[in-house]
C-alpha cells in the first residue's frame, strides 16, 4: 500500500471517479493519507461527491506521473472519528482554512478491499492489494 500512497503523493493530483445514477462523475483530489494502516481520502459532506460515495461506495482513482499511471479500485468506508479527521488535516494543514476535525462538514473515508495497479508502456503492471 505504501507504494500506491507514495505514487499519489508524488503525482499531487489524482482523479476520483464515482457515479451519480447512471452517470460517471470524475474530479481532481489531492488528499492521500495513511492512518491506522489504511489509505484515507478527505472531502466535505456538503459536496455532491460525498452523497455519491454514500450511495455507491465503489470508486476508482487514477493518477499519472513520469510516464506511469496508477488505478486504484475499491470500496470507501467513512470513518467518523475525530482522530482520523485530525490526522488527515494535520497531514494537509492547507485544508484547515476550509475544514476542521470538529466541524460537521469534514469527512474522511478509507479504502476496503482495494487493488492498485501501476502501469507503464515499458514495464509489466505492478499489482498491490490492500
Image (cartoon, rainbow, N blue to C red):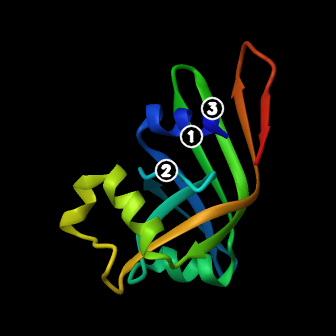
User: Relative to the observer, which residue lies in front, 16 or 42?
Assistant: 42
Residue assigned mark 2 = 33
Numbered disc 1: secondary structure:
helix
Q: Residue at x 51, y 20 (%)?
A: 66
Disc on the earlier residue, 3 or 2: 3
Give how far apart the Cα atoms at labels 3 and 2 are: 12 Å
Q: Which numbered dot is residue 3?
A: 3
Question: How many C-alpha atoms fall within 10 Å of the one at disc 2: few (<14), some, or many (≥20)?
Answer: many
Are the residues at dot 2 and dot 1 in contact (C-beta closer than 8 Å)? Answer: yes
User: Relative to the observer, which residue lies in front, 54 or 62?
Assistant: 54
Numbered disc 3: secondary structure:
helix
Question: How many C-alpha atoms fall within 10 Å of the one at disc 3: few (<14), some, or many (≥20)?
Answer: few
Are the residues at dot 3 and dot 1 in contact (C-beta closer than 8 Å)? Answer: yes
Give how far apart the Cα atoms at labels 3 and 1 are: 6 Å
Q: Which numbered dot is residue 55?
A: none
Say which quarter of the image contains residue 110.
bottom right
Please state the total of marks drawn on the protein image.
3
Say which quarter of the image contains residue 101.
bottom left
Give how far apart the Cα atoms at labels 2 and 1 are: 7 Å
Q: Residue at x 32, y 80 (%)?
A: 102
Numbered disc 2: secondary structure:
strand
Q: Is residue 79 left or right of residue 91?
A: right
Give the percent coordinates (x, y) of residue 18.
Answer: 61, 67
Residue assigned mark 1 = 5
Amino acid at each position: 500500500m505504501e507504494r500506491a500512497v507514495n505514487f499519489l503523493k508524488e503525482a499531487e493530483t489524482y482523479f476520483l471517479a464515482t457515479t451519480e445514477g447512471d452517470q460517471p462523475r470524475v474530479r481532481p483530489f489531492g488528499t492521500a493519507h495513511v492512518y491506522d494502516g489504511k489509505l484515507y481520502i478527505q472531502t466535505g459532506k456538503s459536496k455532491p461527491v460525498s452523497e455519491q460515495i454514500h450511495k455507491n461506495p465503489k470508486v476508482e482513482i487514477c493518477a499519472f506521473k513520469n510516464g506511469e499511471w496508477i488505478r486504484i479500485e475499491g470500496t470507501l468506508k467513512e470513518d467518523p472519528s475525530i482522530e482520523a479527521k485530525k490526522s488527515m488535516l494535520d497531514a494537509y494543514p492547507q485544508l484547515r482554512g476550509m475544514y476542521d476535525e470538529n466541524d460537521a462538514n469534514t469527512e474522511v473515508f478509507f479504502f476496503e478491499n482495494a487493488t492498485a495497479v501501476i502501469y507503464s508502456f515499458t514495464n509489466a503492471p505492478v499489482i498491490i492489494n490492500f
